[in-house]
Amino acid sequence: MQLRFTTDNADAAVLDVEVKELVIAGWVGRDRAAVLHHIRELEALGVPAPGAVPLFYRVATNQLSQQIRLEVVGEETSGEAEPFVFFHRGEYWVSLISDHTDRHLETFSVALSKQACIKPVAGHAWRLSEVKAHWDRLELRAWIKTNGDWITYQQGALSALLTPMDLLNRYFTDRQVEEGFAMSCGTLSAIGGIRPSSEFGMALHDPLLNRTLEHTYITGSLPVIA
């Protein structure tokens, strides 16, 4: 899948990236006790427990999209803001992605629910090397529109999650990273619980360099026909 990113760098103002391998990292909280507690909560709702923590889901690259308007099947899907790291021309870059997921299908198979929905991606990126040293200070936030008003849906520092460097080291245990690899690096809990919304906004803010990655998208619901 071909993606295009603008950057703040004069030597790479525009990146045309062909993503050849997409991985979604799940269960990436640093507090293992909290992760296990969340697993038990989801099990009570019918969501199968992961086979490992963290767990890496492979997803088709054609599920990536930088479009603003998307379509989903049914009324039980929702977004999750996550850092998005990709390898391009010999270095890692970071952007922003929503792991939009079918919540009904998730009760049968988390892996299939990841595959069922398009993954919206922001159109701007930073060099990972520019934020690596202060990664934990980056702030992730998401909003959903409810009754015409934007309300905060997710909010917190990335210190709550495993770093992308840790995740990459865990994933690449027997091979080297290749051009076009991309990983969605986990998310924060939803404030007030996971729930659907047709409009989703997300941002990753760097307080040290005073800049923000942002993306907003709208989903239209297709009917479920049996």
Image (cartoon, grey):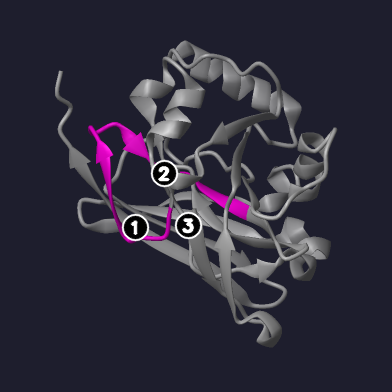
Which amino acid lies under the numbered mark 1 shown in the image of this protein?
Tyr
Q: Nearer the viewer, residue 55 or 14?
A: 14
Quadrant of the image occupied by residue 196: top left
Q: CA distance from mark 1 to mark 3?
A: 9 Å
Image location (x, y in percent) of residue 122: 48, 62
Image location (x, y in percent) of residue 80: 47, 44
Quadrant of the image occupied by residue 39: top right
Residue bearing mark 3: 121
Q: Mark 3 or mark 2, which is nearer the start of the sequence?
A: 2
Is the magenta region chiefly helix, strand or loop?
A: strand
Give the number of the mark in front: 2 or 3: 3
Q: Are marks 2 and 1 in contact (CB under 8 Å)?
A: yes
Q: CA distance from mark 2 to mark 1?
A: 10 Å
Give the answer, above or below, for where 216 lies relative to 26.
Answer: below
Q: Mark 3 or mark 1, which is nearer the start of the sequence?
A: 3
Q: Is residue 135 left or right of residue 19?
A: right
Residue bearing mark 2: 79
Query: Which image quarter is the C terminus in?
Result: top left
Q: Residues within 10 Å of mark 2 (few under 14, many from 20)?
A: many
Residue bearing mark 1: 217
Label 1 sits on a secondary structure element that is strand
Q: CA distance from mark 2 to mark 3?
A: 12 Å
Q: Which residues are magenta?
A: 65-84
Q: Is residue 3 left or right of residue 217?
A: right
